[in-house]
Image (cartoon, helix red, strand yellow):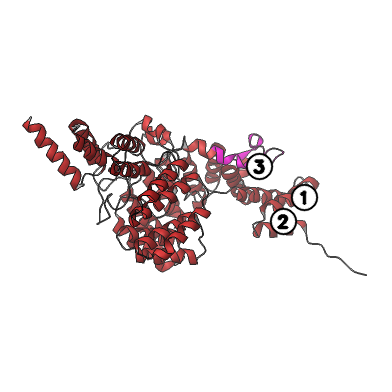
Amino acid sequence: MEVTVTMDPLFLAWSSCRRRKFQRCSDICSKLLSESPYDQAAWSLKTRALTEMVYIDEVEVDQEGIADMMLDESSIAQVARPGTSLRLPGTSQGGAPTPAVRPMTQSGRPITGFVRPSTLSGRPETMEQAIRTPRTASTARPVTSASGRFVRLGTASMLTNPDGPFINLSRLNLAKYAKRPNLSKTLFEYIFHHENDVKNALDLAALATEHVQFKDWWWKVQLGKCYYRLGLHREAEKQFRSALAHQEFVDTYLYLAKVYQRLDQPITALNVFKQGLDHFPAEVTLLTGIARVHEEMNNITSATEYYKEVLKQDNTHVEAIACIGSNHFYTDQPEIALRFYRRLLQMGVFNCQLYNNLGLCCFYAQQYDMTLSSFERALALVSSDEEQADVWYNLGHVAVGIGDLTLAYQCFKLALAFNNNHGEAYNNLAVLELRKGRIEQAKAFLQTAASLSPHMYEPHFNFATLSDKVGDLQSSYMAAQKSEDAFPEHVDTQQILKNLRQHFATL
């Protein structure tokens, strides 16, 4: 007679949770709770599984909404000293490529090799500009409001429970749970991440901290996270500092540095990262944080050095490889950049952006046999119209390089067909139209490019040159001034302004 041995359901649920099969774990726990509603172990395990299903790493998620940007009460000085602010990037430091070589984003910083939340949010000057900013990942985009974004993330919890919330927060006695260390931490994670209820999470954290007589560093970090989410950055700073006094922990240093970056104190953030490195030598996340801050301050040389340090510790770090490869490409070393991008390909990174970069590196390294096949792969892997537009725009550049202007014209037109806000494509089309002698068409394209991408100096400079040639000196002077604002060190713009000022002086 065969004896069938069945696994204990709770152990099976725990095993599923360990293997990250959270939905299965939740279903088993639900069945256990329907049979025994007061089973604390099943309740706690289901809470944890539901939290993990929608968990987001707070260190990485950092996007400022329009409200946070325009209604910022924490700024002290309106005009910060050069090199001390992330909001006024100013001129490049440390021998970084100029905008003539390396394109700029709308936030006034050079294009990085890796898209991060912090590189997507620029700092518009006026509310009108903030609202009009194109909302694509390729440009600086303010989201409507950071708090609104977290509410939308919180709605993911509804998908996991079609019958309604697992825990009715309004009926919870938080003071009772705060005294139970085995349940309070699990409950806090559920409220903060799954339900996205920062107020109740803050109340629970405050009660639990009080219960442990302010000696538990974990609760202080959670208080700091709640204050940060609510925009109370100074209170968050105090909690993270207090937590570090109790226990050195890598994440706490990262949270504290994030607070200083939001307060626009990059030098203090760098000091925090370096203090962390004193306690945790060669920690990859801290080194990456330092590199990112240097990159945001346009100090590309220092950023590259730190990314190289990251690769010494973790030679599969995608962000570091991509950023170093991008830096080599823009410092006129496409062959070396190609080696870094091929390394990413060997690691299994397989997307449109990588093949697009490989195609450009092959073209500038004069490996023409690989160029078109890389772009074909890129076109096969596109996931959005913006990506498709970028690939066609780069193909247009390749066509210009080999002298096929008809193909270049078609490529730039295709780029605009997929993304009508592509300022660079408008600018290049204007140059091609001018070569055909269509002055009015070229002027229209340049004006469109200038209005879509005010951060670029090229459309303003080209319009100034064109207006100067046709005798419209006033328009030429105004466009040259805008070009100078976008790129103060541009020699040709300075020459046009000098000639126009001499001409106006003699009138």
Q: Is residue 120 visible?
A: yes
Q: Which mark is residue 113?
A: none
The residue wearing badge 2 is: 13
The residue wearing badge 3 is: 159
Q: Is residue 310 above or below residue 228?
A: below
Most foreground residue, 263 or 419: 419
Dot 1 falls on a residue whose secondary structure is helix
Dot 2 falls on a residue whose secondary structure is helix
CA gap, disc 3 to disc 2? 20 Å
Check the image and name the residue furthest to the bottom: 1
Asked if the residue under mark 2 is in contact with the one under mark 3, i.e. CB atoms within 8 Å, the reply is no
Check the image and name the residue furthest to the right: 1
Q: Is residue 317 above or below residue 212?
A: below
Most foreground residue, 485 or 273: 485
Residue 11 % position (x, y): 73, 59
The residue wearing badge 1 is: 32
Q: In the image, which residues are magenta? A: 151-174
Q: Looking at the image, which residue is at 41% across and 62% down?
A: 321
How crowded pointer 2 is (Cα within 10 Å; few <14, some 14-19, many 20+) is rated as: many
Instruction: Identify residue type, mark 3.
Output: Leu
Dot 3 falls on a residue whose secondary structure is helix
Most foreground residue, 454 or 152: 454
How crowded pointer 3 is (Cα within 10 Å; few <14, some 14-19, many 20+) is rated as: few
In this rendering, would 36 be left or right of 464? right
Instruction: Identify residue type, mark 1.
Output: Leu
Residue 229 % position (x, y): 48, 41
Asked if the residue under mark 1 is in contact with the one under mark 2, i.e. CB atoms within 8 Å, the reply is yes
Of callouts 3 and 2, the N-terminal one:
2
CA gap, disc 2 to disc 1? 10 Å
Question: Is residue 440 found inside the magenta-colored segment of the image?
Answer: no
Instruction: Identify residue type, mark 2.
Output: Ala
